[in-house]
Image (spheres, helix red, strand yellow):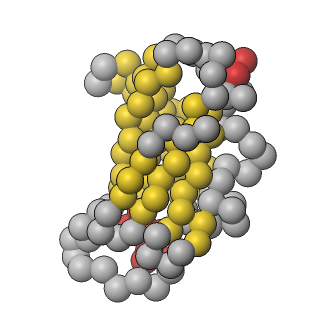
Amino acid sequence: MGLSTHVLDTMHGCPAAGMAVVLYDTQGTDSHLIKRFVLNADGRHEGGPLLATANLKVGTYRLVFAVKAYFVARGVALPEPAFLDEVSLDFGIADITQHYHVPLLVSPWSYSTYRGS
């Protein structure tokens, strides 16, 4: 099943449609861009998994969510500098036979994540 993500805007109580996200493969302080994408109306990557099981490898990854830009585009008045700009989540994949789902619950002032199913 691979790697997936889902972002919910907890300020407005809806999926974070239109939020820009970047996925990296990381090795220590080095990172390699895998893909950039914008979340669909359901707050997910259009077309399914970010990486299919066949493309997963054991190692570390980073998802970067453009939180400030998303809320500004929604018309939310934010202070300058904003409390949150980009939310960067570093995570590891230890078993490529399992599905890794990385959800993000976010507002302009807080976020939460967990390993979903």
Residue 82, placed above or below residue 113: below
Outermost residue to the front: 117
Residue 92, placed above or below residue 69: above
- Image coordinates of residue 89 in percent, x first then y, are 39, 41
Image position of 117 (left or right of 88): right
- Image coordinates of residue 116 in percent, x first then y, are 55, 40
Does any portion of residue 36 appear in the rendered image? Answer: no
Give the position of the C terminus as an image quadrant: top right
- Image coordinates of residue 20 in percent, x first then y, are 53, 57
- Image coordinates of residue 39 in percent, x first then y, are 63, 57
Of residue 18 and residue 8, the one placed in the foreground of this image is 8
Residue 66, located in which quarter of the rendered image?
Answer: bottom left
Q: Residue at x 26, y 70 (%)?
A: 82
Residue 58, placed above or below residue 103: above
Q: Residue at x 70, y 66 (%)?
A: 41
Does any portion of residue 110 appear in the rendered image? Answer: yes
Of residue 9 and residue 40, the one placed in the foreground of this image is 9
Count of residue discs: 0
Outermost residue to the right: 47
Image position of 107 (left or right of 103): left
Of residue 116 and residue 62, the one placed in the foreground of this image is 116
Q: Residue at x 30, y 80 (%)?
A: 78
Residue 88, placed above or below residue 44: above
Give the position of the N terminus as an image quadrant: top right
